[in-house]
Amino acid sequence: MALRELGLRHFRNLGTQKLRFPPEGVAVVGENAQGKTNLLEAVYYLESLRSFRGAGDSELVAFEESTFHLRGLVEVDGERTTTVRTGFDRARRRKKVSVDGKETERTVDGLGLLGAVVFSPSDVNLVNGGPRLRRRFLDMALSLDGNEYVGTLSRYRRALANRNAALRAAARPRAVEAWDDGLVFEGARVTQMRRAWVADWSDAFSDYATAISGRDSVHLAYRPDVGRGPKARGRDLADGEDAIRVLFADRLRACRDEDRRRGSTTVGPHRDELLFTIPTRHGRPLPARSYGSGGQRRTAALALRLTEAAAIRKRRCDPLLLLDDAFAELDEERSRRVMELLAEERGGQVILTAPKASDARLRGPTLERWHIRDGVIEA
Ligand SMILES: Nc1ncnc2c1ncn2[C@@H]1O[C@H](COP(=O)(O)OP(=O)(O)OP(=O)(O)O)[C@@H](O)[C@H]1O
Ligand SMILES: [Mg+2]
């Protein structure tokens, strides 16, 4: 898929502009604080309906304005196009999404229409930061891949919120347990889908990591919370959803008193971990978050984005690559290897940003250059 046109109105500092993107993409060059990341944020908003920087929708509205609007004209294949429109009203806190002129009933119906992936230097937080960021990565990858996950996850969250409210109110045991079946049912599905995603892609991840660093460096593993109890030892979660359900129900029973004391549910996929590990000579792999070098962590983050792109290519389309000054902190050797890996993905569109023209190296001089200054883009 490719982005043909982007219409912007009052999104951050980008003013009102209409941009027409070349099929192969563009390199956007501009100094610091001119709006390069804002532009990629706007493009990715059309994919995910949220900011990839974790900003709230109100922060995206230009200072002094009350609403922003975005319109993307997306080429689905050679001939077919789709128009996605979205807008947010700060005062009413309302988000609207329409696809080809029809307003979507649920925002999830507007998700994943571009098949885009963002590469940014802040991706290293995926490795260095807390598990919440990694769960969010998995949730995004799975949500953009299809509607089923989104529904399951939101039903799980609702059951969890209700159970926690009952725990906080110190309700009678029956009032707490009323939520258990739903929690276990949806939670096991969430666990199963996350497990399947990591099982499908962990080899590709390791291959990318090896290709970037030139040696066996980082691996990816899923550590579901339901696998932590003593009963889980020796059991294979690959046995499927029913096996996961039994484990989850056991854990929930075992933690009942603890949950009451704390006033919240202490077991379940909201406690899952996606682990980056580095191999060691004496057998046991160690978590990259605590033991990895700076280079190994950046490698892990890049390999994860490349894996995300590969998953999109397999299930949906050639990914639209959004590279936000992505090689800023990589050494020469690593950036050359990443560039080679990306260059192998022929065909897909690329929008990259860089502070200096000499940094816009991917696809070399073939990529059209645009300049950005104070939010204004000159093609
Ligand atoms: N809601 C908003 N309304 C207007 N301007 C905004 C808004 N949010 C951010 N900005 C402005 O956008 C600018 C930053 O843009 P951006 O993060 O895209 O810079 P950049 O070109 O990526 O810079 P760098 O090279 O440092 O990463 C800042 O000057 C900031 O004041
Ligand atoms: Mg930036």
Image (cartoon, grey):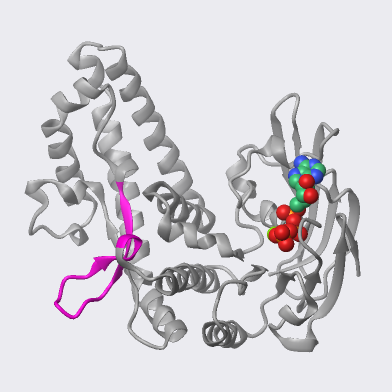
Q: What span is colored magenta in the figure?
A: 272-290
Whether the magenta-drawn stretch holds residue 213 is answered as: no
Name above or below for residue 276 compared with residue 59.
Answer: below
Name above or below for residue 55 compared with residue 292.
Answer: above
Foreground: 259 or 214?
A: 214
Going 59% across and 82% down the picture, which residue do you hit? 342
- Could you tell me residue 49's position as x and y percent? 64, 47
Name above or below for residue 101 compared with residue 122.
Answer: above
How many labels were placed on the picture?
0
Q: Quadrant of the C terminus?
A: bottom right
Whether residue 209 is visible here, answered yes or no, is yes
Q: Is 224 positioned to the left or the right of 258 in the image? A: right
Foreground: 337 or 4?
A: 337
Whether residue 100 is visible here, answered yes or no, is no
Foreground: 267 or 191?
A: 267
- Could you tell me residue 19's position as x and y percent? 87, 62
- Could you tell me residue 1's position as x and y percent? 68, 70
Q: Is 11 positioned to the left or the right of 48 in the image? A: right
Going 77% across and 39% down the picture, which residue do you hit? 61
Q: Is 44 positioned to the left or the right of 10 in the image? A: left
Going 18% across and 16% down the picture, which residue do you hit? 173
Whether the magenta-drawn stretch holds residue 286 is answered as: yes
- Could you tell me residue 267's position as x and y percent? 24, 38
Q: Quadrant of residue 292?
A: bottom left
Foreground: 296 or 268?
A: 296
Going 61% across and 52% down the picture, which residue do you hit? 52
Q: Is 136 positioned to the left or the right of 2 in the image? A: left
